[in-house]
Image: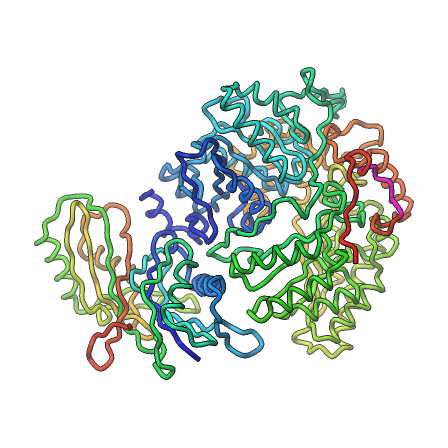
Amino acid sequence: MPRYRMLYNKVGPARYISHLDLLRTFERAVRRAGLPLAFTRGFNPHPKIAFAAPLGVSIAGEAEYADLELDVLLPEDEVAWALSGKLPQGIGLIDIKTVPEQTPSLMAVVDRATYRAEAELAGRISVEELNVAVNAFLELPEIPVERKNKSGKIKKHDIRPGIFSMSGRLNNGTIIIEAELKTGSSGNVRLEEALAAFKKNSRLPVRGEFVLYRTGLYTGRNKKKKMLW
Amino acid sequence: MELLHQILPRVQKPARYTGGEWNAVNKDWDRAELKVAFGFPDVYEVGMSWLGLQIIYGIVNRRAGVLMERVFAPWPDMEEKMRENGLTLFTLESLRPVRDFDVCAFTLQYELSFSNVLNMLDLSGIPLRSEQRNEEHPLVIAGGPCAFNPEPLADFIDFFVIGEGEEAINDFLDVFLEAKRRKLSRRDFLLETAQIQGFYVPSLYHVLYRADGAVQKVFPLKEGIPEKVTKRCVRDLDRVFFPVRPVVPSTGVVHDRIMVEIMRGCTRGCRFCQAGIIYRPVREKKPDTVLKLADELVQNTGYDEISLASLSTSDYSRLQEVARSLLDKHSGCGVGVSLPSLRADNFSLELAKEVQRVRRSSLTFAPEVGTQRLRNVINKGVTGDDLLKTAGAAFRKGWQAIKLYFMIGLPTETEEDLDGIVMLAKNVLALGREAGVPRGRLRVTVSVSSFVPKAHTAFQWEPQTTQDELKKRQAYLAERLRQRGLVYNYHDPGMSFMEAVFARGDRRLGAVLLKAFELGCKFDGWSEHFHWESWREAFRLTGVDPASYAYRRFNHDDPLPWEHIDTGVSGKFLEDEHRRALAGITTGDCRTGTCPGCGLCSTLEIRPVYAGG
């Protein structure tokens, strides 16, 4: 069955749509677009829409990916045209292309994501001081965070191996942190955890909370960082 | 609204507060002469499941020069953050403060949402009592089923709309726009509004009380204001506006599907049921209308399910034909049909089996009571045999779970009636076993609510059974319904008590409501937020005895606090129905051609409408 890879963003009010609700949101948009969505067989059929990696509620996604299967092969342009006008506010289709049927699923290949976090500065800080703080953080041999497991027990995890890079800059009273973190089924690092650990370690003068963006999703298989596109 | 984005990541289900859903309407604020905020006094998921909101939203927003935006009661975690950060209540479309609107309109679907109305006004920075507000504040109005006894909210609401809103809301918009152009004072505007059918301005009415505390009389303070406010009622349901571009929530809500109203009103005449009175007469839509609406709705929403909504879907004359046509047309794209509020009969069962694409594992029936005697008292036209036959057939057709709705505390109820509930539940369970439903899967859920006497019904004169007695009866059932495969649910009697107090309350409850709000009461319909102790304190501090409302037995010649609200059904008919109930005499279905004589058709000059076939 023809498979289409979508590149989209999820910003504005849509960043508060949960992962579970997002599937339904796309399903309804596809139906409104009049496209022949493919369903799984079986007792309770599910639409064949598969996302690369769940995005936490309230994180804006600037370059997200999902695969969509249709029952009928249609030109990419036609699918894009039909779908783009039918998405709710804040979800924007950026591009769409067909992918060969044997292409591995997005979820199987994605293993890293880039993020940006922005917050208001509450005091003075120089670029040099910020760089020192970031480097000191990255030089930590391990960064333990506490996570609850499924049975509610608190366990310690070292997230340092999952932090591939991090940098900071300043812009008009705003502090901007960019990071590349491990994502996917093993060794996943949540941006919130990394930021909390960084804040604790560096004691930067930040007012309020960081506003979070996921800026890209990549695969690092075969030692080479590559876009999922 | 940067502040909002600081708060939202910290609350549960932030999508409740952000808007941006498909089909949400964002009109130009500066080009609207009249702006209405529609307030639903419960959480987003409940409010967005209510068809009436979509209807009213559609009617207002399709008019040029006016706009309507939505606002729901923030869940307590959000409220806490809003108050902490000084964020006032805002609408979902433009994120503007509710107090910037000209009108704030509430719907009253449930008595236990009244405290949320006050809390929402307070969160908006709008003075609660009508007399504290002036031209600078939004007009605060309300409608919905609970407006049929508006008195407990009389201190807070500038006017109530009694009855169906489709036409009334346009009348209101006309009058308001005209008043704005003529620069009428609020008082003069209200005087004009009070003369339109269905509009009740409580400040223009005075209440006299008797020495024993009961209401003596409610009467207009000025000439030209009607003594009785008669409900609004749509004549032609095929022609009246129905929303084909409803807002499609981006987050899961309670009823997350297309709702096509196929019929309004119900002919069965269950004596406890208020909806059965206030939505009279029955009006069925033509099959063509339903099919056309459904077509557009499927295209415009993308939902995968069409629900044929009404008070009693099995009664719709052309149900089978409509359900089949919908299925033929839409099942190819994976769109199913669902039939809510089915009657326990074979026809309904066959149809449910035929049309429901995604087979629900459970079927729901409402035998209401356990014995035929009591079923005659309440005029519920289903027999225990019907139910057992249908349940047996359902299990044989593959359903594994059945839900049964009952009510306890009804007038004349005895232990025998409770035993009847137990027996019925066990018999249904036994049928499941006989039909070979696997033991682990077989489930009969018995949901038991407590009778609440409602204004304008044949049981409006009856007292509610006391909380202590209800608790005893609940315990009696609990003891006897302990068996593998049986699940027993019941309602908090304290909540049912409060519902009864407000359902038959008068204006003096305004002070109690205000006190309860000050003590932090909100979301009273949610058991985790219902605080009986706070309510008790509110009654104590205001010197009002709640039992005198819930447990009062009115005589037929006693004045009733809601008598100035006219449903079109005659008082004489309700009295007769009440007498017949106590004598165990049933009354026929209006649909069968023998007119039960409720008097509505002549009073409102209207007729029931059937789709024929």
Observer-nearest residue: B269 or B81? B269
Q: Residue at x 48, y 46 (%)?
A: B75
Residue B347 location in percent, x, y? Answer: 78, 66
Q: Tell whether B453 sits left or right of A178.
A: right
Q: Tell whether B383 sits left or right of B357.
A: right
Q: Quadrant of residue A214?
A: bottom left
Indicate whether residue B596 is drawn in magenta. yes
Q: Is residue B270 above or below residue A17?
A: above
Residue at the left extreme of this rendering:
A128
Q: Taken as a whole, is the magenta stretch helix, strand or loop?
A: loop
Observer-nearest residue: B584 or B150? B150
Q: Is residue B470 above or below residue B533?
A: below
Q: Is residue B569 above or below residue B190?
A: below
Residue range in magenta is: B594-600
Q: Tell whether B476 sits left or right of A177.
A: right
Rendered-image quadrant of the C terminus of chain B: bottom right
Residue A58 location in percent, x, y? Answer: 35, 55
Residue at the bottom extreme of this rendering:
A102
Q: Quadrant of residue A17?
A: bottom left
Q: Is residue B119 above or below residue A228?
A: above
Q: Quadrant of residue A20?
A: bottom left
Residue B455 location in percent, x, y? Answer: 74, 37
Residue B301 location in percent, x, y? Answer: 52, 57
Q: Residue at x 57, y 18 (%)?
A: B188
Q: Residue at x 78, y 72 (%)?
A: B393
Q: Residue at x 40, y 42 (%)?
A: B94
Observer-nearest residue: A97 or B552? A97
Indicate whether residue A208 is drawn in magenta. no
Q: Can residue B54 be seen from the camera position used here?
A: yes
